[in-house]
Image (cartoon, grey):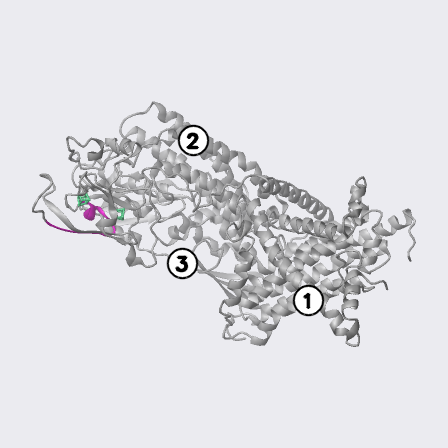
Amino acid sequence: MAFSLPQYSWRELWEKGWSGFVTALKGMRVTIRYFFSRPTTVVYPYQRLELPVYYRGRHRQRVDANGIPWCIACGSCARACPLECIHIEASANPEPPDTKRRRKLDRFDIDLARCMYCGLCAEACPQDCLMLVADYEYSAWRPQDLVAPLSVQLRPEPLSEAELRYRADPASDPAPAKPKPPREASAGEGGEG
Amino acid sequence: MAGQTQVGGDPFEEMLVNMGPQHPSTHGVLRLLIRVSGEYVEDCRFHIGYLHRCHEKISESQTYVQNIPLSDRLDYVGAVPNGWAQCLAVEKLAGLEVPARAEYLRVIAAELQRIASHLLFVGTMGTDLGAVTMFLFGMREREMVIDLLEAMSGARLTYHYIRIGGVARDLPDGFAERAVRTLDTVLSRIPDYDDLFTNNRILRERAERVGVIPAQTALEHGFSGPTLRASGVPYDVRRCDPYGIYDRFEFDVPLGSNGDVYDRFTIRLREIEQSSRIVRQALEGIEGVGGPIRTPIKGRFRPAPGWAYAHVEGARGDVGYYIVSQGGDSPYRLKVRSPCFGNLAGLEHLIRGWKIADVVAILGSIDIVLGCVDR
Amino acid sequence: MERGPIESLVHRLFAGLYGIPVLGWLIPIVLVLGMVALAALVLIWLERKVSGHIQSRRGPLHNGPHGLLQTVWDALKLLVKEDIVPSSADRLIMLMAPFVVFTPAVLVYVVMPFGKGWTVANLNIGLLWVVSVLSLGPVGIILGGWGSHNKWSLLGGMRSAAQLISYEIPSVLALGAIVMMAGTMSMDGLVAAQDQYEFVLTPPGLIAFVVYLVTALAELNRNPFDLPEAESELVAGFVTEYSGFKFAIFFLAEFANLLALSMITVTVFLGGWQPPSVLFFLPDSAQLPGVFWFAIKTTVMVFVFQWIKWTLPRLRIDQMLNVCWKGLIPITLGNLALACVWLLLTEKSWAR
Ligand code: SF4
Ligand code: SF4
């Protein structure tokens, strides 16, 4: 196959060469300006970016004041998950903390290595107790270590102001109308969380 | 010489080079088999499918709601429009109305996504042509736009923002000012790009009159998006088949004239400006629009039997979803029209006769994402 | 020939062993080798820092102050890495290549005047030595490209051959104008000839300087002429199959070359170890040792090379050859004529 090179006149060559020289200098002006300006990067382990409160990181289970999760073991989250990464086993609770939580969780594992953090499980939860929080530092050496059991998911601290505001918005709630999470009369905000 | 496959012709002149699937500049896992004579490409064949994830088949076994996050994985650097196209098709199928505020939010997200995607393109074009600094500059500005999208949706890459019947959540407080500020910064950096890269003589030599796609050829191969518009065809779904509320906004559709690599590069820079215009208008427009952001779905979501096709203008072109329902929980058939696949299709005969260095430039200028090509 | 401090030190130290001249040369050689290795490590760090800050990043930070030790650990990592040789590679050629690249890069320093009289060997054909030794490097690159039996390596090697053979010519022609003006090829002589003003301040010198910068970029395989190792096109060009120690040697050679070419530019165009003539109003500047000025100027040149590298995109191979044959060679030929005119005008005699 024969190929032909474009032919240039000397004049064109001169113009190309000169503009090449000038535009190279212009580019160098830009780079030297950035050389002396402040870097935009964040030195990660020492500095952190602030994430939005509804950032979809790892899962958390909200618990009541006694440290018992609000979960009623209904399995909505497991059904909503496209990837089937939530495994729930539950049995009848001999001493239920309230009328709703008649079943207690024996196993609530989330395979974080398989999860795609879509947030559908949290939206499906009728108790509004499963949530994805802005925590992204849970790397492990092996994928099986990323299966998070219930114990590491519990979140004792109450919801922050910002989280409450975002979650109070009914329009952002998922489709099925859901009952409000049970509220303990005396506990106030702690009861909410 | 062992290991050197000869394909006809003069065995001492030609060799078969395997570019990819693990090559720095095939933008994913594309494999090109190139027969070169010296540096000239004589023939080229593509092998795709290394990233095939059965998107369409998986969708048939999942519910409509569960399918939406998967769409983000197609064109993962321009995820929002994919979800929009899918939701639009499902909404057509189910006859769902979208609240007015959600329409504005969708426009804002999609246009921010277009800006982010084009900024990434500007950067990768830089690395493809050897200007690594341009890559980092493009990434730097993209990060800022991604921060906005993160504030809107809660994720940085796979947003899962557009949902059936609306969007996932409302704008956070003070978003409008923050967005305008970010867009101002991004636009103020474009003159720097011009000095550093766009007007650079070397870039112009590398890009002008290289990889020319005539309008006719582009249409025949099913090109779409900026790649098609660079050849001078004024096809933009936002204009030709307006969806959402795009008919309310004022914006230009930038057109190229030559259809070369340089046009495909500059047209995206100009689209960044147009998109930021749309975002500004949408941010103003949304002020007075209250109300819900999602139409609630009652009970189990089972659209009536039938089919629907919806397409939107994604960052890379015309994203289309064709969904057939038989009245069940999940689609009977789901078909994606991916812009990257169409854009890639014409490349095989495009890069013939250019040099290896040009192959990289042309491939980069088409701006493919292999997740979108392979599905 | 007058002895410089190093030479006289050596002569004093080894006066008893004078019958064995090899020992007399050993110390300077070890010194130079050590300096090259150390400087290369620092230069790699500098390159990372410069590129980082140009790109709004920070570059290495964590190992040592401002990441200064990062290169050391990287070098150690490369040394302990497995040395992979493709089964169909030509083992001997592949092994030879890094050293063929590295040796000339170090040999150049033999004639380098680091300071007043600080020369290992003051050859009277110093510049010729530099040019001829540097042109050996590409041989190693071609060997590496051929020996590793990889098509990308081969393409890189061939590109390198085309590039370096072409760019030798304008490079030599640009230096030729300077040699005419100085009337000597000895590196010390070149520095001495710039005691009034640097050659870069004369019109032919300026043109030669710019052309030499371009050719130096090409010889260093740096942007916009990094075609032999164009990452986005040829994966890694001629180093595609290299790993571990051999790769480290290539890496070292690259930075040794960078340093060498910066030093040559400084010596030939920027007045070597003498204080810059533009600082004549600072009478104290002459008090500082020459090696100080030499180091400063070299660092500036290295920075300029890095600055250019991180700014420009890459040329295509035919454009690169066009730039050389249709651009630089005519310019340098014209520059030779200009140098003649300049010599006549400034009434310098041909033979000094
Ligand atoms: S975030 Fe999505 S993928 Fe992960 S567990 Fe929840 S529903 Fe499943
Ligand atoms: S949906 Fe909520 S309440 Fe039901 S099992 Fe999951 S976490 Fe528990």
Q: Give me the chain letter of mark 3.
A: B
Q: Secondary structure at mark 1?
A: helix
Say which quarter of the image contains residue B102: top left
Mark 2 crowd level (few <14, some 14–19, many ≥20, 10 Å Cα): few
Name which residue type carries label 2. Answer: Arg
Boundaries of the magenta span: A76-91
The residues bearing labels 3 and 2 have C-alpha atoms spaced at a distance of: 41 Å
Residue C341 falls left or right of residue B99: right
> CA gap, disc 1 to disc 2?
60 Å
State the residue position of label 2: B178
Q: In front here: B175 or C172?
A: B175
The answer for which chain carries disc 2 is B
- Position in image of residue B285 (x %, y %): 38, 25
The percent coordinates of residue A177 (x first, y second) are: 17, 35
Of the numbered discs 3 and 2, the one sitting upstream in the chain is 3
Q: Which residue is mark 3?
A: B48
Q: Nearer the viewer, residue A182 or C120?
A: C120
Q: Quadrant of residue B65?
A: top left
Residue ranking furthest to the top:
B288
